[in-house]
Each structure stands twice: as structure tokens, then as C-alpha cells.
Image (tube, rainbow, N blue to C red):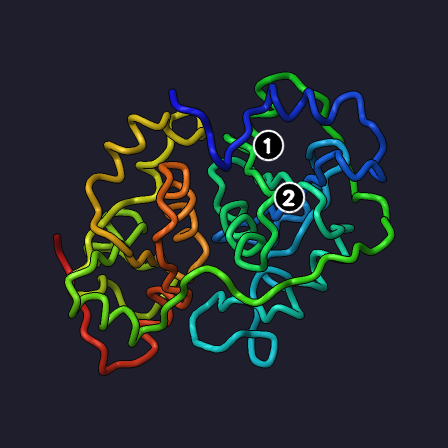
Amino acid sequence: MGARRWLVDVEELAAELLPPAGDADPGRPLVLDPRWNLTGPDGREEFEAGHLPGARWVDLETGLSGHGERSRGGAGRHPLPTPAVFEQAMRQAGLHVGRPVVVVDGGALLAAARLWWLLRDAGHDRVRVLDGGFAAWQRAGLPVATGAEPPVPPGDFVAGPSRLPVVDADGVAVALAQGRPVVDVRAPQRFRGEVEPFDPVAGHVPGAVNLPGAALFGADGRMLPTDRLADAVGDLDADPVLYCGSGVTATQGLLALAELGREDGVLYAGSWSDWVSDPDRPVATGR
């Protein structure tokens, strides 16, 4: 397996965190846990039932998404937050400029990849993702904390100008016209339009290809080794546009591309929930 670029395994992270050097140590990673449930309540209750020692919970809905004036613009169920909203969320979590971050979630990096992407987009590249998430930490028999995290002094994190490529629905149409790949990372049955549990219209963007996010991970919830990951991703042409249901899990695909050394992945932030908000946009079903 090739060297990981943005992922860290539990053994390496445990060596950095245990025994704790003290949360004020600027060299010690700050662990941020944006635990989130696609179909249920926010992840705070799950976080408080068990998390990495010293981890800070981050609310995806209020800190990693924005609505109305808190949004960068665009429709969809999880629009990107404004820099000010994201900056405030990171400061509340105690993040300081330059401090390394490790992002953790329950398992398959649903929300962890979103936070990884937002930090990099804001200019904070000292960020890694725990491969396998909290589930992998538990399986390794490592210490677990419970309950709410204690208060910490606010950090001084600064969200810089957006650095990573993002497109809206018009940008997707342009990509298709240019022959660039548009990739739908949702489950195959949602791509085919057989089921749609979240949005009012089922199907996919005409011309899109399906690369389910689940295909990027092994049975243990860890991202596939580099050689198998390359096979799963396949031979995508340059500047692929990735989308999902609402712009959250598409970042799993962007993380996979980045692990393969590709920084050309583009996020369709509004994703399917934005695409179907306009009844005049075409919809395809089937394979």
C-alpha cells in the first residue's frame, strides 16, 4: 500500500495523542469530530456516547453548512457556509492558526471528508482524516471518552479566501458540454432513480457516471489501499465534477482523488438537491 497523503491510521494517531501532552500543546493535533446522521438527529448524542479523548464535536448543520445569509449562495440541502460562519465554528472548537487537525467521524468519513475539504478550502492544509473513524479507534481497543467535551478558550483560526474549485448547476452543464466527467457518488439505486429518500425527484444528471462512495471503502470502513482505490476510481479525465445528494458525501470522492495525488476534483456544492430545485433541468433514470 502506498503512503497515505491525507489519511492517518489509529496506531499513528494514538502515538501522537496518548498519553496526552496537554491540549494547549501547539504540536498536538486538535481532534475534531463532526459526527452526523444522514437520516436522524445530529450526531451530538452519538458523540457523547463515545469519542476520542480530547475530541471536539462540530455541528455539520450549523458550522459546516450555511443557509440564507449564512450560505455562500446556491440552493440545496447543505449549502457551503460563508467563511465567517466556518471561521466561527472552528474558533469555537478551539482551533488556532497553524495547529494540526485530525478529523474523525463515526466510520465511513461522511462528514469528516466535508470538514477536511472546508479546512483546505480555507487555507488550512495541516489536516488529516482518521482512516476508519471512531469505529477503527474502538476496534483497536484504545481509550474512549464519554459525555460532553469541556469548554475551551476560543481559537484564532482565520478562514482565508476559497481555494478549491466549486461549480453550480450552470458549471455542471458547462463541464458536460466540454466532455469532462460528471460523477455521482450516491448509491446505485438512487443514481438509477429507483429510490429517492431525500429529494422530490429521483434520477441523476444526464451524462453523469456513477461512482458510489461505498465502493471507495473496505468492509472495515477504511479507505481502500492506494492500488485498489485507483482501480475503483478508474480512469477519470481531468477536472471531474463530483456531486452527491446535498454536497456532503461528494467530498468522500474528492478525498479519494486527493489520496491518489489528484487535486483536480471539482465540487458541485448544491448537488442533486440543487439540480432538482429547478423543474426545467433535465433528469435521467436507469443506468
User: Which residue sits at x=43%, y=75%?
Assistant: 75
Residue kind at label 1, given as amino acid type: Phe
Would you call the spot at circle 2 few (<14 residues within 10 Å), some (14-19), or many (20 or more)? many
The residue where tag 1 is placed is 134
Reply above or below: 238 against 215: below
Residue kind at label 2, given as amino acid type: Asp
Q: Quadrant of residue 215?
A: top left
Q: CA distance from mark 1 to mark 2?
A: 9 Å
User: Which residue sits at x=61%, y=51%?
Assistant: 124
Whichever of callouts 1 and 2 sits on the residue coming sooner in the sequence is 2
Reply above or below: 8 against 69: above
User: Which residue sits at x=26%, y=39%?
Assistant: 233
Would you call the spot at circle 1 few (<14 residues within 10 Å), some (14-19), or many (20 or more)? many
The residue where tag 2 is placed is 33
Where does residue 271 sit, x and y in percent of width and height?
Answer: 36, 64
For residue 272, the mark is none
User: From the image, which quarter does the N terminus lie in?
Assistant: top left
